Image: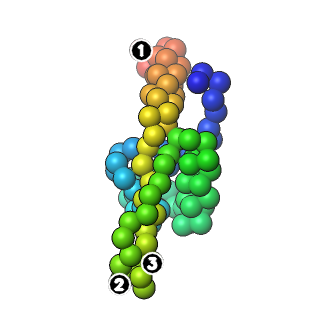
C-alpha cells in the first residue's frame, strides 16, 4: 500500500467520513465548513465519494426512503478496512516528516 496515492481533498473527505462513522454527502459538506472552514459544493463531494468508493476506500449503502426527501433514499458512506489502513499510513508518514523539522522538535 505504500505507493497508493490519494489527493489532499480525498484525504480530507476520508477523514471526515472516518470521524462520523457513517456519512451522508450533505453532512460531509457541513462538516468541512464547520470543522475546517472549507467550502465544497455538494457535487464536488459526490464526485470524490464515488472516486473513493471506486478505489475501495469507502463503501456505501442506501438508507430508507423518507417523506422529507419525496420518497428518495439517502446514500450513506463508511470506511473500508483498506481506507482505514491507508489513513493510518498517511498519518505515520506525515508525523515522520513533521518530526524532521528542527524548530518543531
Residue at which label 3 appears: 72
The image position of residue 87, as x and y in percent, is 47, 33
Tell me the CA gap for discs 2 and 1.
55 Å
Q: Nearer the viewer, mark 2 or mark 1?
A: 2
- Asked if marks 1 and 3 touch (Cβ < 8 Å), the reply is no
Secondary structure under badge 1? loop
Residue at which label 2 appears: 67
Q: Nearer the viewer, mark 1 or mark 3?
A: 3
User: Residue at 64% across / 33% down in the picture?
Assistant: 5
User: Residue at 45% across / 40% down in the picture?
Assistant: 80
User: Residue at 61% across / 42% down in the picture?
Assistant: 55
Secondary structure under badge 2? loop
Secondary structure under badge 3? loop
Question: Considering only order in the chain, which callout, 3 or 1, is on the residue closer to the N terminus?
Answer: 3
Q: Pick the residue in front: 84 or 62.
A: 62
User: Residue at 62% across / 58% down in the picture?
Assistant: 47
Q: Residues within 10 Å of mark 1 (few under 14, many from 20)?
A: few
The image position of residue 22, as x and y in percent, is 37, 53
**Quadrant location of the N terminus in the rendered image:** top right
Tell me the CA gap for discs 1 and 3.
52 Å
Residue at which label 1 appears: 105
Q: Which mark is residue 1?
A: none
Q: Pick the residue in front: 46 or 66.
A: 66
Could one spot residue 104 in this view of the protein? yes
Occupied quadrant, residue 49: bottom right
Occupied quadrant, residue 43: bottom right
Amino acid at each position: 500500500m505504500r505507493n497508493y496515492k490519494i489527493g489532499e481533498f480525498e484525504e480530507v473527505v476520508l477523514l471526515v467520513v472516518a470521524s462520523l462513522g457513517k456519512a451522508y454527502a450533505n453532512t460531509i459538506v457541513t462538516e468541512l465548513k464547520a470543522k475546517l472552514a472549507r467550502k465544497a459544493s455538494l457535487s464536488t463531494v459526490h464526485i470524490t465519494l464515488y472516486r473513493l468508493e471506486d478505489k475501495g476506500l469507502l463503501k456505501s449503502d442506501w438508507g430508507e426512503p423518507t417523506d422529507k426527501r419525496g420518497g428518495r433514499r439517502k446514500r450513506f458512506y463508511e470506511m473500508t478496512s483498506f481506507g482505514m489502513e491507508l489513513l493510518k499510513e498517511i498519518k505515520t508518514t506525515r508525523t515522520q516528516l513533521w518530526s524532521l523539522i528542527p524548530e518543531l522538535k
